[in-house]
Image (tube, rainbow, N blue to C red):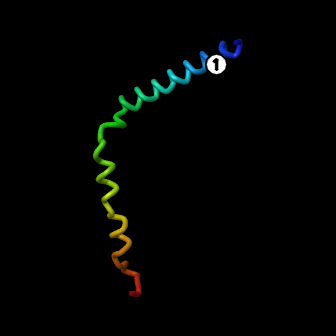
Amino acid sequence: MEVLVFLIPVALALGALGLVAFLWSLRSGQYDDLDGAKWRILNDDDVAAEREPQDNDPT
């Protein structure tokens, strides 16, 4: 039972830390653009740049 004196405050502190981190992420705008990630994954500009021949390419 003596271990509960240590574990309960640690659990409450970790829960409060998680809540603070979540509230910080809300205020900093982490969830503002939910659709942007799904469109960015479909954008393959880097693949198209690899396929274009370079000026110093002998082919």
Residue found at the far bottom of this picture: 59
Residue found at the far right of this picture: 2
Quadrant hosting residue 30: top left
Vertical placement of 15 versus 49: above or below?
A: above
In this view, the residue in front, 52 or 19, is 19
Rendered residue at 40%/82% (across/down): 57
Task: Return the x and y of residue 23 as percentages of the image width and height.
Answer: 40, 26
Quadrant hosting residue 52: bottom left
- Name the amino acid, label 1: Leu
**Position of residue 28 in the picture relative to residue 17 (left or right):** left
Instruction: Check disc 1 and report its element: helix, strand or loop.
Output: helix
In this view, the residue in front, 34 or 25, is 34
**Position of residue 8 in the picture relative to residue 54 (left or right):** right
Task: Return the x and y of residue 35 as percentages of the image width and height.
Answer: 28, 46
How many numbered tags mark residues here? 1
Rendered residue at 61%/20% (across/down): 10
Vertical placement of 21 versus 31: above or below?
A: above
Q: Residues within 10 Å of mark 1 (few under 14, many from 20)?
A: few
Residue wearing tag 1: 7
Rendered residue at 34%/34% (across/down): 29
Task: Return the x and y of residue 28 as percentages of the image width and height.
Answer: 37, 32
In this view, the residue in front, 53 or 4, is 4
The N terminus is located in which quarter?
Answer: top right
In this view, the residue in front, 58 or 33, is 33
Rendered residue at 38%/87% (across/down): 59
